[in-house]
Image (tube, rainbow, N blue to C red):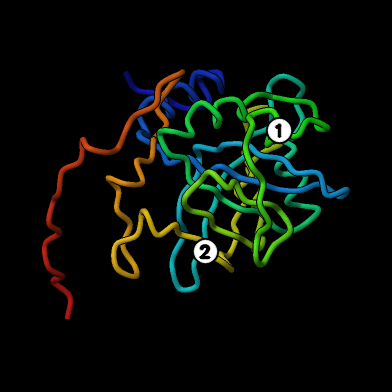
């Protein structure tokens, strides 16, 4: 099957993409609105974006239900700040609750029975139950469309990082077996990372 993107509905393209670009890390993003009310939502269009200086990015899509942008994007635009909380197996059910399209006035921390705790460098709270948090200041938002299914690429610089000692090896390595993160697949599918891992040793550089 050969596909020209313009020949298919965007939802079909979306299904093909999320079914083949797998597994995807989950950025569990906490923000606050102008009144200081917290919001929490997961995004599987999420990744790291360099380490010097450290940046992460996530991509909220325009909702199909009402054609509006997500509360997370609105909050980031208003505050210029967000926190990415890492999702573990144990937190999967709570994360799933926060994926619900709630009205803007709903506090997802309360809906999912999670504990908000203060951040160090930004206003949005962290998820206390998560072992790793990236506190971020907005660097740039790149708009990729105006219709339902279009995304905004939200790029933030990491200004503070929390890592629980229970998932840390030495001073700079994460114990994946202890962290037990989960990945996003298609539909209702998720995957476990540990213990189904294997190693491939990267060949040495041929430059220099």
60 versus 101 height, above or below: below
Q: Residue at x 32, y 18 (%)?
A: 1
Residue 139 relative to residue 6: left or right:
right
User: Residue 130, how many percent across, how many down?
Assistant: 51, 46
Q: Which mark is residue 139?
A: none
Few, some or many residues within 10 Å of mark 1 (<14, 14–19, 20+): some
Residue 14 relative to residue 74: left or right:
left
User: Residue 104, how many percent across, how many down?
Assistant: 80, 32
User: Front-most of 156 and 100?
Assistant: 100
User: Front-most of 136 and 108?
Assistant: 108
In the rendered image, which residue does mark 1 sit on? 110
> Which SS class for mark 2?
strand
User: Front-most of 206 and 26?
Assistant: 26
129 versus 1 height, above or below: below
User: Residue 187, how many percent across, how many down?
Assistant: 46, 18
* C-alpha span from label 2 to label 1: 24 Å
Q: Residue at x 53, y 26 (%)?
A: 6
> Which SS class for mark 1?
helix
1 versus 107 height, above or below: above
User: Front-most of 165 and 22?
Assistant: 165
User: Residue 100, how many percent across, how many down?
Assistant: 65, 24
Q: Residue at x 53, y 43 (%)?
A: 129
| Camera-side mark, 2 or 1 | 1
Residue farthest right in this picture: 35
In the rendered image, which residue does mark 2 sit on? 161
């Amino acid at each position: 099957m050969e596909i020209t993107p313009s020949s298919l509905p965007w939802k079909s393209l979306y299904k093909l993409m999320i079914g083949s670009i797998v597994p995807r890390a989950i950025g569990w993003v906490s923000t606050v609105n102008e009144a200081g009310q917290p919001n929490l939502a997961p995004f599987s269009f999420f990744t790291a974006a360099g380490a010097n200086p450290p940046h992460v990015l996530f991509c909220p899509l325009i909702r199909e239900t009402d054609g509006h942008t997500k509360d997370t994007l609105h909050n980031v635009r208003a505050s210029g700040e967000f926190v990415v909380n890492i999702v573990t197996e144990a937190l999967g059910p709570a994360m799933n609750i926060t994926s619900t399209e709630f009205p803007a006035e709903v506090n997802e921390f309360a809906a999912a029975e999670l504990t908000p705790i203060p951040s160090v460098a930004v206003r949005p709270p962290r998820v206390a139950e998560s072992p790793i948090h990236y506190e971020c200041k907005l660097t740039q938002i790149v708009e990729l469309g105006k219709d339902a299914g279009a995304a905004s690429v939200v790029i933030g610089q990491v200004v503070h990082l929390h890592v629980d000692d229970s998932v840390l090896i030495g001073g700079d390595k994460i114990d994946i077996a202890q962290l037990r993160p989960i990945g996003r697949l298609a539909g209702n599918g998720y995957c476990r990372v540990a213990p189904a891992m294997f190693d491939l040793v990267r060949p040495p550089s041929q430059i220099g």
